[in-house]
Image (cartoon, helix red, strand yellow):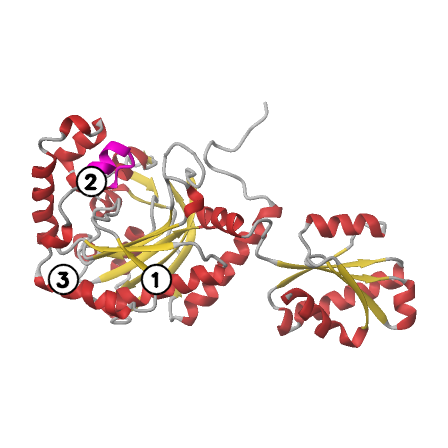
Amino acid sequence: MKYKAVRGMDDILPEDAQIWQWLEKTARTELEFYGYKEIRTPILEETGIFVRGIGETTDIVTKEMYTFNDKRERSLALRPEGTAPIVRAYIEHALYNVSPECRLYYIGPMFRSERPQKGRSRQFHQIGVEVLGTNSPYADAEIIRQVNSLLKLFGLQNFTIKVNSLGCKTDKAAFAESFKKYLSDKKARICDTCRDRMKKNVLRVLDCKNESCAEIARQAPDIADNLCGTCKDHIAKVKNALKGVKLEEAKNLVRGLDYYTGTVFEITHPSLGAQDAIGAGGRYDNLVKDLGGPDTGAVGYALGMERIIIALKKEIPGSDCAKVVYIATLGDAAKIRGIQIAEKLRKSESFADIIVLTDVKEASLKSQMRTADKNNARAVIILGENELREGRLTIRNMVKKTEESVEENKLFEILKNALEG
């Protein structure tokens, strides 16, 4: 019998892993510059954390979570998102006593039982950020600026950051009643799922992708009209602090998780079609208290790694994000010298972001060039008997399709120019 991966849970093969590694490395470096520290929570959590945190009427809890009872009849769930587990850890380990403002980030897999499609897998991966211990609008603005910077570091340009405010609990409740009244004479025009949402959680109707429901939502009252003075002041300060960042004010933007209040935002990219979100986040000032901790303000976001990779490949066709240099050698003496050059490159701070590959099969030059091409090498260093004798190297620029012979002591300078070009 031939076994296959579970549907919607894909293998990441070696030829693809380098882009994942590059994204993770870039994210870690950038986030640590901002003072965030990595946290790693278990893949399994008690189901109640998500039911109470995300909301028992949300699609994630009612339809998408992988849950099971263990041998002691405890209900456990594969984590469908990263925030609730981090809040659980924040409370369990009293991290609020360690620092009044806790900056955390995570990178890892999440699980939801959805119909697999482009950019939506049953096992998917997120890069996420949480700031716990502050109610300040400037924390909201900082993480939006930070995610904008991170996406540009990844190489993305054509993304849109949409921003809205849901207001406080009182504001949300008032708008929910207003929205329910608006929908009362439109039940025949909305889908069956949204008719059910009207009874359980009417704000979910605003997130429906059905065109008829979406059109009705576009004509709905504006949640901004229901914001109290404090919430209006908060979102105004957020927007003012984001001057210079390209934003789109999105009427009635909501998130699929009940814990959000106040500022919410979503990042979309046109290459993903109808399911165009590559990331989202917002403020969740009640979640820590709801899960048994102190009354603590918090804000965060999560990015979908699979969706970012799809968007990158659309924006930069053929891009694998990593810079690869291949050293092609002919003859035993050249192989030994090639290994030595490879080690120098790997240890050089000037080439900290490159991958150096060498021939390990004693293949012909033609075969080695094919290998370099398959690995998307940006440059090939060619070293044979003639080069050894003359103390020179041949550098082939695989992007510009040019080639030049250089003295070995000028290798680093010429190679750096070739990679940057």
Residue placed under numbered mark 2 in the picture: 217
Q: Give left or right: position of 138 versus 11.
A: left
Return the disc, 3 or 1, that comes first in the chain's sequence.
Answer: 3
Q: Nearer the viewer, mark 3 or mark 1?
A: 1
Q: Are marks 3 and 1 in contact (CB under 8 Å)?
A: no
Where is residue 95? Give x, y as percent.
28, 65
Residue 232 numbered mark, or none: 3
> Quadrant of the image for the N terminus?
top right
In reply to whether residue 66 is colored magenta, the answer given is: no
Residue placed under numbered mark 1 in the picture: 246
Where is residue 223? Give x, y as percent.
14, 50
In reply to whether residue 214 is colored magenta, the answer given is: yes
Q: Which portion, as a residue range, is magenta?
A: 207-217
Q: Residue at point 73% right, 52% down?
A: 372
**What amino acid is at disc 2?**
Ala
Where is residue 257? Give x, y as percent.
25, 46
Q: Residue at point 12% right, 35% down?
A: 183
Q: Is most of the magenta stretch helix, strand or loop?
A: helix
Q: Quadrant of residue 220?
A: top left
Q: Nearer the viewer, mark 3 or mark 2?
A: 2
